Image (tube, rainbow, N blue to C red):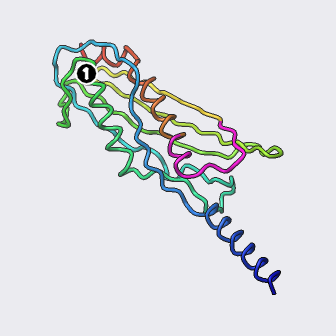
Amino acid sequence: MTGRILLAVAGLSAALLLSACSSPQNLQPMPQRSVDVPVSGQGQQVSVIAVDGRDSETLGTRTGSANSTSTISVAAHEIVPRLQSEAERAVSDMGFSPTAAPANDGPALTLTLKKLSYVRGESRPLVDEAHLESVLEAVATNNGETYTGTYTSRRAQTYAVTPDKATNTRMVQDLLTDGLDRAFADPELGQLLAR
């Protein structure tokens, strides 16, 4: 009798553990630029727009299987306002005055999240791996001139225990922060906006 109870408890525990591993994770990263930006503005107004240009809000799955229910996603309505805020802060730190108003041939900056992916890498005994990649595109326009910068960040993370939601959020947040740092450290953006 005691053996059956222990077996039932073990079975229930295993089922709960497996269901937790297969449940979707909806991440809410809060990336924040952490580098100084080149100052090139003198208070000019710059139209700033952040856009989600991804094909899907799903980054991938924790199991690596396309049919898995253990999806990892970042919703556009979660990430776009954060990217907008960071783009406005960067433009302000560059010496410009950010605005959401359309540019009408004046200086404008569009920051687009082109890609955000999470792919399970090779499995080795006791260790698994995840490959993360983000691609941000910054397009600066001013008086008919355009500068486009593409900023790719990659991260390979090994782990013995499948990452939980907090760990995955931190990894995606760090990845996006690196992309923001790369984008806004590019002196060409500010130089074109200042012309």
Q: Is residue 84 above or below residue 193?
A: below
* Residue 91 shown in magenta: no
Q: Position of residue 163 (x, y in %)?
A: 62, 49
Please count the marks in the image: 1
Q: x%, y% of residue 123?
A: 78, 46
Residue 153 as seen in the image, left or right of residue 2? left
Magenta stretch contains residue 159: yes
Amino acid identity at mark 1? Asn
Please give the name of the residue rendered at 37% of the width and 50% of the height, measured from the top-left corner.
Answer: 78
Q: Position of residue 118 (x, y in %)?
A: 59, 45
Mark 1 packing: few (<14 Cα in 10 Å), some, or many (20+)? Answer: some
Residue lying at the far front in this picture: please name it: 2
Classify residue 29 by image quadrant.
top left
On the rendered image, what quadrant is the C terminus found in?
top left
- Nearest to the observer: residue 101 or residue 174: 174
The residue under label 1 is 142
What's drawn in magenta, residue-wise?
157-170
- Which residue is located at x 31 percent, y 38 percent? 84
Dividing the picture into quarters, in which one does residue 101 lie? top left
Write the residue at 64% across / 45% down.
Answer: 119
Residue 12 horizontal/vertical position (percent): 69, 75
- Please tell me whether mark 1 sits on a helix, a strand or a loop: strand
What residue is shown at x 33% (from left), y 13% (from top)?
A: 38
Quadrant where the N terminus sits is bottom right
Q: Return the residue nearer the eye: 44 or 71.
A: 71
In the image, residue 69 above or below residue 58: below
Q: In the image shown, does 156 or 148 lie closer to the viewer?
A: 156
Judged left or right of residue 171, residue 95 is: left
